[in-house]
Amino acid sequence: MKPRHLLLIGSLAAIAVSIVSTGMAFANDRYATLPPVRVSPDLSAPWVAQLHGQPARIKAVPQSLQPAPRVAARQKQKAKSSYRQVSYQRPAANPATTVRKHQIDPAYLPQTVSYSGNEKPGTIVIDTGKRFLYLVQSGGKAMRYGVGVGKQGFSWKGSQRISRKAEWPTWTPPKEMIARERKKGRILPARMEGGINNPLGARALYLGSTLYRIHGTNQPWTIGKAMSSGCIRMRNEDVTDLYERVPVGAKVVVR
C-alpha cells in the first residue's frame, strides 16, 4: 500500500508544479512587450494628422456632373419651330343664306310659257311692271325673258317697230344724259365703240326713230330692276338669242 500512496502523491505534485508554471508564464506574457501593429499608410494618415492638430488631406475623386435635362427649354424650342403665322380670316357665312351680289333670280332666265294675249306671233310684248319680255309664238305660247327697265321718271309705254339691228353697237350717249351724269360727278364719253365694257352689250334692236333700244348690258345683275334711262336691257346671251329670232320691222309693244 505504501508504494501506491507514494506514486499518487508524486503525480499530484507534478500536476501542481505544471499548473503553477503555466500561470507564471501567462503572468509574464501579460507584462511582456508586444510587437508593433502595422497599419496601411492610407488608413493611418488621417489619424496621424489629427494627432498633430492639422486637418487631414483627403484626396477627392473627381466626378463629372451631368446637367439635368432641359425639358422646358426643349419644349419651348419645339413649339417655336412648329409655329406658323396665319392671317386672320372672317368666318364664312352660312352657304344656305348667302346671296351673291351679282346673282340673278332664276325667274328671269329664258323659258317657254303659256300666253293668252291677242298679239300675233313674232310680236314683242314688254311688261315693265313684271320686268318680262315676251316673244309671242303660235299655239298660245311665248318665249319669256327677264329684262331691266327704265327707272322712275324714265319709263315709257307705247308701240314701235324695230328699225335697225346692230351687233356690238357703238354707244353715243345723248347730250342730256352727259349733262345729267356730270352733275353726279360721272363723266361719260361722247362716243364708245362696241365691246364688253360698252353698256349696250352684245346686241341692240333700235325702236323706230326714238332713242330707246332693246340691248344687252355689261351689268347683268340689274336684270329684273328699274335702273335704265328708258331702254330695255337684257343679258347678252338673251339679247343675242332674241336678235336671231326677230327681223327688222317686228312690232314691239311696251306696257
Image (cartoon, rainbow, N blue to C red):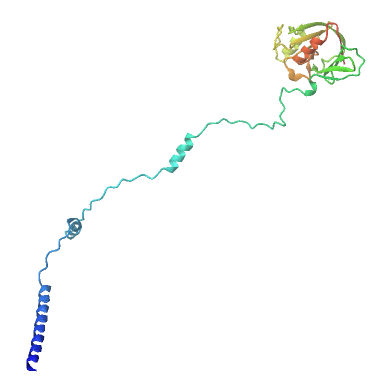
Is residue 107 rendered to the left or right of residue 9? right
Residue at 8% across, 87% down: 10
Looking at the image, residue 78 lies above or below residue 154: below
Rendered image quadrant of residue 69: top left
Residue 120 x/y as whole percent: 90, 12
Q: Is residue 127 among what the camera can see?
A: no
55 up-or-down from 163: above or below: below
Q: Which of 150 and 244 is in front in this view?
A: 244
Tell me the quarter of the image containing the C terminus. top right
Q: Quadrant of residue 137?
A: top right
Determine the residue positioned at 78% across, 23% down.
106
Kindly indicate the quadrant of the structure image that contains residue 227.
Answer: top right
Q: In which quarter of the image is the N terminus?
A: bottom left
Residue 22: tell me if it is visible.
yes
- Image x and y of residue 87, in percent: 57, 30
Task: Estimate the x, y position of residue 103 in percent, counting from the top left.
Answer: 73, 23
Name the residue furthest bottom: 1
